[in-house]
Amino acid sequence: MPSAFLPERGVVRVTGPDARQFLDNLLTSDIGEVGYEKARYAALLTPQGKVLFDMIVSEAEEPWGGGFLLDCSRALAPELAKRLGFYKLRAKVEIADISDSAAVVVYWSEATPPEEDGVTYADPRLPALGTRMITNREHAKELGGVDGEAWHEHRIALGVPETGRDFVAGDVFPHEIDMDQFGGVDFTKGCYVGQEVVSRMEHRGTARTRIIPVRFKEGFAPLDGCEAFAGGKSAGRIGSGAPGGIALALLRLDRIEDAMQAGERLTAGGMEFEPVKPGWARFPFPGEGGAAIPEA
């Protein structure tokens, strides 16, 4: 049963008597719902509503230092800790990037982490993503059973994007990376940074661009970042790929729909692809108005 050490993931710890309210005032999810073994997917946005950092927020029991642990991109962890510090003001919180000493291990396909080896939590985005654990970095290396690329193949097959591989931090709105589909945005909680823009996109249904899975007919995907075309018009770009020609792509869905309705080709790197609707998608999907779309 597979498990993998994810060296590209970092950890930021937030502790102190005001930590829960502090994070709840900033992040897109209801941090009041976070508890031991119960995590939430969330993001810190710009005032204009774009995703600066996405993360999984869990709560640690005292033997593991207490407070809240933010499972995030390791490359962005120092900047996340710094940005949170800008908002600290008089809040009684302590913020630290602990990525040098802590790391993330992921377990999927019914694999489970060893008891009491770290802070464990079900991945809040999709049940099929399994369970994650934050533990000592050296111990994490020992626990990782397979190469991390096996995990990414599993993630891509499920249609779940990741920072740096499928989108650039600061360039996308939460809807564009499907955070609304994965429980990463609470539309009933109070204000948070960027809340007005995100709420407006939700209520007006103005998210035309999204990351979705695609399948290349040649059986393999082009290089990450390759531009995608719909009927000869630019429609987005390809992100991470997996064996079998499955890849994730950030696409203008209206342009994909128009091309499909007109019987025009969808291409990237000179190769033809088709959208693949994942089971979690609740938004209007290209082809549902006419051309058939294969289910994932």
Image (cartoon, rainbow, N blue to C red):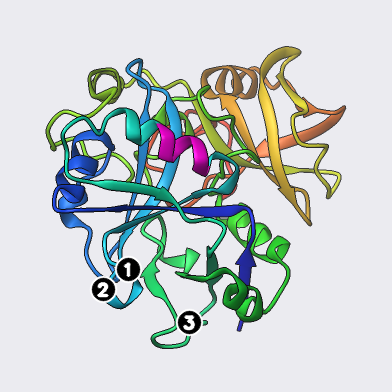
Instruction: Tell whether position 78 is magenta.
Output: yes
Image depth: mark 2 or mark 3 in front: 2
Choose between 236 and 274: the one closer to the eye: 236
What number is the disc on residue 65?
A: 1
Residue type, label 3? Pro
Q: Residue at 18%, 56% (x, y): give it.
A: 33
Q: Residue at 32%, 17% (x, y): give it.
A: 47
Residue 228 locus on image (x, y percent): 72, 24
Q: Which residue is mark 2?
A: 62
What number is the disc on residue 113?
A: 3
Q: What segment is highlighted magenta in the picture? A: 77-82
Q: Residue at 53%, 55% (x, y): give it.
A: 99
Residue type, label 1? Gly
Residue type, label 2? Glu
Q: CA distance from mark 2 to mark 1?
A: 5 Å
Give the secondary structure at mark 1.
loop
Residue 195 locus on image (x, y percent): 24, 24
Q: Residues within 10 Å of mark 3 (few under 14, many from 20)?
A: some
